Amino acid sequence: MILLTGFEPFGGEAINPSWQAAGQAAADLSQCGVEAVAVELPCAFVESIAALRDAVRLHRPDLVLCVGQAGGRSKVSLERVAINIDDARIPDNSGNQPIDSPVRADGPAAYFSTLPIKQALQDLTDSGISAEISQTAGTYVCNHVFYGLMDLLAMPPDGGARGGFIHVPYSSDQAAVHAAPGMPVADMAAALRVIALTSQRTTSDLRLAAGAEH
């Protein structure tokens, strides 16, 4: 079972392409005979982790792909690391704005994705989809969910599954409004299908230079 999650709209946007892409990818995977489900998460610090935990415990996935929007980025971003900090530039959809607060007070400083991000990058590139390895998922609800996911999967009774976080750009319509890079939702969904299928079949990640100088 593959669980994909996306977020509700936030920051004044009418849509969130992470949810649109996650839903489309789950439907496409299901049509191909791969058991998959998509769940929409609230864009709120406290509520998002609770909803994610409920989804993991309900569906008992082997693989979890959490997806969020990174407006301004031009590529699908495979996130490498989640850090134990919330530092919100804007309030979440519940009006909360934590500053310099840990995701979990007694938690480790960071978690790494357990997805084969280098192999996924190679497979995305081979498929003609613009993608990159990202070294930061920010300090807003996306990183909060990424950290919460890896924390959840690291401990019983929810341990055992692999998971990680993917950022997608603005949709094409949003990009036109913001004069920023964008991507069709269909291409985002195709990227998520590639990442899901790559993650299912890959047990040892590829060694591929994809770091950053800054």
Image (tube, rainbow, N blue to C red):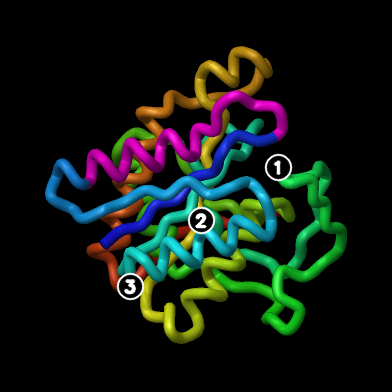
Q: Which structural element holds mark 2?
A: strand
Q: Does dot 1 land on a helix, a strand or a loop?
A: loop
Q: Which residue is mark 2?
A: 165
Foreground disc of the pair 1, 2 = 1
Q: Quadrant of the N terminus?
A: bottom left
In percent of width and height, residue 172 lies at 51, 19
Q: Which residue is mark 3?
A: 204
**Residue 52: which disc?**
none
Provide residue 152's location: percent of width, then percent of height. 52, 74
The crowding category of the residue bearing disc 3, from other C-alpha atoms within 10 Å (few below 14, some 14 to 19, many at least 20), is few
- Callout 3 amino acid: Ser
* Residue located beneath label 1 in the image: 93
Determine whether 123 is above or below 208 in the image.
above
Name which residue type carries label 2: Phe
Mark before the other along the chain sequence, 2 or 3: 2
Quadrant for residue 48, please give it: bottom right
Question: Dots 3 and 1: beta carbons under 8 Å?
Answer: no
Question: Crowdedness of circle 1 by 10 Å Cα count: few (<14), some, many (20+)?
Answer: some
Q: Position of residue 68 (x, y in %)?
A: 55, 45
Camera-side mark, 3 or 1: 1
Left or right relative to 62: residue 137: right
- The residue drawn where x is 80% and y is 51% is 96
Image height of 12 relative to 38, above or below: above
Say whether residue 17 is magenta.
Answer: yes
Q: Is residue 50 magenta?
A: no
Cα–Cα span, label 1 and label 2: 20 Å
What's the residue type where badge 1 is placed? Asn
Depth check, mark 2 against mark 3: the one in front is 2
Span colored in magenta: 11-29
